[in-house]
Amino acid sequence: MITRVAARRTEDRGTPEMGLFDRLRGRGRRRPGRAGPDGARTTLDRGSQRADLAHLEQFVASRRGVEGYVEPRTAVTETTIVLVAADGEWTRRRIDGPDVARKLSRELAIPVYDAQVTGYPQRMRDWSARQKPNRS
């Protein structure tokens, strides 16, 4: 009898009743990386901000031969874009999705590639290797 009364009180408040194992079956709170009832996935990472786009614009304006490489969304991070300059210098920032990356590349007049398909240019790895002694 007590459980029925508790269930009614829960329904009156508009909150769903949750059983002991509902969380394990995925009926509890949405966890990062999992799709919820609306089909939307969440990540552990924050979304992109205006400062991210401003940094990308500044990077393109101050370097020559910049190309963009779009990295897909994962359970841990949002979609990101890696910009690689002609000398191999690179930067990575969050963006709101592949469509935003393509729109940004049109506005900045730079080529954009899918990192999963093309991989990263060798000059990016070479630049990173040259920077390691400077970090010590």
Image (cartoon, rainbow, N blue to C red):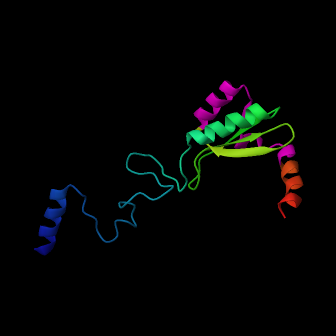
Q: Which residue does the image show at 24% across and 57% down from the upper left? A: 15
In this rendering, position of residue 23 left or right of residue 47: left
Question: Which SS does the magenta portion mostly show?
Answer: helix
Res 1 → quadrant: bottom left
The quadrant the C terminus occupies is: bottom right
Q: Which residue does the image show at 24% across and 62% down from the upper left? A: 17
Percent coordinates x, y for residue 98 in the rendering: 61, 36
Relative vertical location of residue 125 with respect to residue 54 in this rendering, above or below = below
Magenta-colored stretch includes residue 21? no
* Residue 82 can be seen, yes or no: yes
Give 38 or 121, whichever is nearer the viewer.
121
In this rendering, position of residue 40 left or right of residue 102: left
Percent coordinates x, y for residue 81 in the rendering: 67, 41
Relative vertical location of residue 24 with respect to residue 114 in this rendering, above or below = below
Percent coordinates x, y for residue 8 in the rendering: 13, 63
Res 61 → quadrant: top right
In this rendering, position of residue 26 left or right of residue 105: left
Q: Which residue does the image show at 83% across and 46% down from the upper left? A: 124
Relative vertical location of residue 2 with respect to residue 62 in this rendering, above or below = below
The stretch in magenta equals 98-124
